[in-house]
Every structure is written in structure tokens, then in C-alpha cells.
């Protein structure tokens, strides 16, 4: 790939240092994705300008006009501290006629809203757990079709915010309590879903029109019988991960037919939700083999060694190859202004 001018857009608090020297593991965890992407792009010979942002779009405009970047590498996950504003930044890039990496505004807007996404999946007959939405400030009345156990989460939050073992509820009293907890702690509507007991899979998808899926990746607890739920602690607490033996790896014992079926479902989700660039699908499979889509993550974690990059390695895409592909997809994405 020729040498490109890259404008890396990152959260102001996550601008990584030049090197890892002197940083603790905890500090590194905060900005590891930004560090990995930026240093690797530089090692690949690209000219990377890093722009830290919090609540002002003017620096983006200035950087685009002054540097004329070939591509903006979008690593922003919030604006003004609001996680659902990610689509607005990308819309602004489109208004500036600036090619960017990752998902388009429409796909970001749809996939961030788990309830809206599930309505669309249901229209396309893509299997996803039965659900009901309990809006902020309203009384919890469980529809009859929604049977216990039920999993309660926020409609918009990600990174397992507010998700713990207590997210699974077994009666109406627990349901009302957990919905109140989600309302209070995430300040968003609560989504209550049929709890899918079974294996948990993650599948990376790359593409705009022609899609490529990565091998099915599985979450496992190798040292504990704790219920298999990707709670906040499972995702982010290193010592807890050690204790449970949290591991993700290529899912074993899936027949080629099942692998193909899962890949097909993931591609259908990607198209149905209008995604582009790259995404990671979260799914679960019951003991009887039935597969359910939990959610689609547009612009998922791109850290070196994380599920997306690891599963890409498995099919021979090095971290550098993966970043090159993502940039290529960003440059080729047919935004309306083109
Ligand atoms: N219906 C369900 N049945 C069983 N487990 C579920 C269900 N919904 C969510 N979970 C568990 O909770 C985890 C987090 O849920 P989900 O992926 O919807 O939330 P998130 O906070 O957006 O996560 P992410 O970190 O992927 O953005 C899942 O990985 C899974 O372990
Ligand atoms: Mg998830």
C-alpha cells in the first residue's frame, strides 16, 4: 500500500504516548487500541497525525483543510461523553467529504440501538432472543410471551456496562428491580430478553459490499463453572479473568455446516443493519444447536491480540493486513457525496 496521510481521531483522554515505557498495565489497557493502531500504521510507513477530541468539531475541520488526509482513522467511541453520538462525527466527516475507516453513520445509528436492531432482524427473520423494552420512568409490565429466565440490559450501552450475574432474573420482582437498576445506572431504557443458555460466539465481518467473515471465536471459562456471561468484570478485570480462566479461541467441534450457517447469519445481519467497514457479531448457541444473534458491534475493539485481530490472524491476515484492509474499505466506501 502506498504511504498515506492518516488522521487518527481519538478520544482526548486516550491519546497514547509514543512508547509503552513507564506505563502500568492498567494505564495501557485504557489506550491500548489507540496505541496499537497508531504505532502499527506508523511502522507501515504511513504519516499519522493524532487528533484528540472531546466536544469540539473545529479541530477536525482544521486538520482536514490543512493536512488533506487520505483517510480519517476513526477510533472515537463518544462525543461530549455520549456514546450514541459516534454516528454524528462520521456524518460530519461525510459532510466534509472526508473518507474514513469503519462504519457509516446509518449503520452506527441503527446498531447502537439494540431494540431497533432487533426489530429489523425480526423483519428479516434472523434469529435473535425474544424481547421487550421497558422505557425510563414507566412501570414494568412483562408481556406474556416473555418467559423467565430473562436477561436485562441497557438498550444503548456497550462494553457490558451494567452487566453482571444479577442481569439474569427469574421472577417479576427481580425483573422490576433489575430494570430499575439499568434505568438508574445507564440512564437509558432497559431491554429485557429471553436468556439464551449456551455457548457464546464472536464473529468478525469485513467488507462494504462483498463480505468476508472471520472464523467463529468462542468465549470460555477454563477454571470455573460460573455461568457463562461476558460481564463487565469478565471483560475488563484482569485478576478476575485469571481466576475464571477467561479465554477466547477458535470454536472447536463446530461442523463445517454449522460454521457456514453462522457465517451466513452474520453476513445477513451486517446487510440488514446497513453496516460497512468492519463489525463483530455476538451470538449464542443453545445445546440443541439453535443460534441466536445477541448484537452487532459496528467499529469493534481493534486492539492487537483481541478477538477481532486474533480471529483474522487465524485466516492469515496479520494485524498490518487487517489495518490495510480496513483503510482500503474506508477509501472505497461509496458515500453519497462521491
Ligand atoms: N439474551 C441473552 N442471553 C444470554 N446472555 C446474554 C444475553 N444478552 C446478553 N448476554 C450476555 O451479556 C453479554 C453482554 O451483552 P451484549 O453483548 O448485548 O452487551 P454489550 O454491553 O453491548 O457488550 P459489548 O461489550 O459486546 O459491547 C453477552 O456477551 C452475553 O454474555
Ligand atoms: Mg456484546
Image (cartoon, helix red, strand yellow):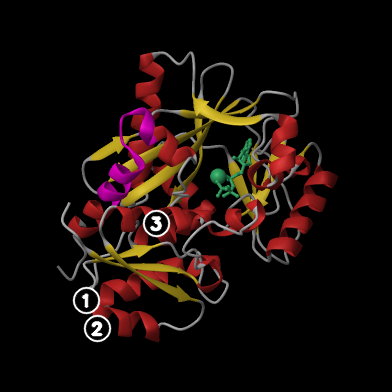
Q: Secondary structure at mark 1?
A: loop
Could you tell whether 148 is left or right of 131 in the image?
A: right
Q: Secondary structure at mark 2?
A: helix
- Name the residue: 75% across, 28% down: 226
Label placed on residue 68: 1
What is the magenta segment's predominant secondary structure?
A: helix
- Name the residue: 37% across, 57% down: 107
Tell me the residue that label 2 is attached to: 65
Residue 321: image location, x then y, percent: 28, 43
Residue 303 visible in the displayed image = yes
Tag 3 or tag 2, which sits nearer the N-term?
A: 3
The quarter of the picture where residue 136 lies is: bottom right
Q: Nearer the viewer, residue 278 or 108?
A: 278
- Residue 310, placed above or below residue 29: above
Q: Report the quarter where the C terminus lies.
A: bottom left
Label 1 beta carbon within 8 A of ligand 1: no
Residue 170: image location, x then y, percent: 79, 36
**CA separation in Å, label 2 and label 1:** 6 Å
Q: Residue furthest right?
A: 173
Magenta segment range?
312-326
Residue 270: image location, x then y, percent: 35, 44
**CA separation in Å, label 2 and label 3:** 24 Å
Tell me the residue that label 3 is attached to: 39
Q: Are marks 2 and 1 in contact (CB under 8 Å)?
A: yes
Residue 65: image location, x then y, percent: 24, 83
- Residue 145, placed above or below residue 199: below
Residue 148 visible in the displayed image = no
Q: Residue furthest front?
A: 21
Amino acid at each position: 500500500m502506498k504511504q498515506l496521510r492518516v488522521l487518527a481521531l481519538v478520544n482526548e483522554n486516550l491519546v497514547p504516548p509514543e512508547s509503552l515505557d513507564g506505563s502500568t498495565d492498567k494505564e495501557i489497557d485504557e489506550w491500548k487500541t489507540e496505541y496499537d493502531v497508531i504505532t502499527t500504521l506508523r511502522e507501515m510507513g504511513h504519516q499519522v497525525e493524532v487528533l484528540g477530541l472531546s466536544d469540539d468539531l473545529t479541530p477536525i475541520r482544521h486538520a482536514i483543510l490543512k493536512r488533506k488526509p487520505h483517510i480519517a482513522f476513526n477510533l472515537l467511541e463518544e462525543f461530549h461523553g455520549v456514546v450514541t453520538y459516534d454516528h454524528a462525527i462520521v456524518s460530519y466527516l461525510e459532510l466534509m467529504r472526508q473518507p474514513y475507516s469503519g462504519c457509516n453513520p446509518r449503520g452506527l445509528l441503527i446498531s447502537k440501538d439494540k431494540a431497533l436492531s432487533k426489530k429489523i432482524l425480526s423483519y428479516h427473520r434472523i434469529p435473535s432472543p425474544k424481547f421487550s423494552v421497558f422505557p425510563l420512568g414507566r412501570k414494568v409490565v412483562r408481556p406474556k410471551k416473555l418467559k423467565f429466565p430473562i436477561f436485562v440490559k441497557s438498550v444503548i450501552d456497550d462494553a457490558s456496562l451494567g452487566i453482571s450475574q444479577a442481569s439474569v432474573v427469574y421472577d417479576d420482582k427481580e425483573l422490576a428491580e433489575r430494570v430499575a437498576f439499568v434505568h438508574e445506572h445507564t440512564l437509558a431504557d432497559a431491554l429485557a430478553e429471553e436468556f439464551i443458555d449456551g455457548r457464546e460466539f464472536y464473529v468478525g465481518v469485513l467488507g462494504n459490499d462483498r463480505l468476508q467473515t472471520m472464523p467463529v471465536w468462542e468465549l470460555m471459562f477454563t477454571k470455573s463453572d460460573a455461568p457463562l456471561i461476558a460481564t463487565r468484570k469478565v471483560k475488563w478485570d484482569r485478576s478476575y479473568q485469571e481466576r475464571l480462566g477467561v479465554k477466547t479461541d477458535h470454536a472447536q467441534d463446530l461442523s463445517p455446516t454449522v460454521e457456514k450457517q453462522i457465517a451466513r447469519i452474520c453476513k445477513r445481519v451486517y446487510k440488514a443493519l446497513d453496516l460497512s467497514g468492519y463489525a463483530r457479531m455476538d451470538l449464542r448457541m443453545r445445546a440443541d444447536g439453535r443460534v441466536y444473534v445477541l448484537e452487532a458491534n459496528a467499529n469493534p475493539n481493534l486492539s492487537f491480540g483481541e478477538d477481532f485481530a486474533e480471529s483474522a490472524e487465524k485466516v492469515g491476515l496479520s494485524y498490518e493486513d487487517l489495518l490495510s484492509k480496513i483503510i482500503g474499505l474506508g477509501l472505497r466506501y461509496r458515500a453519497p457525496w462521491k
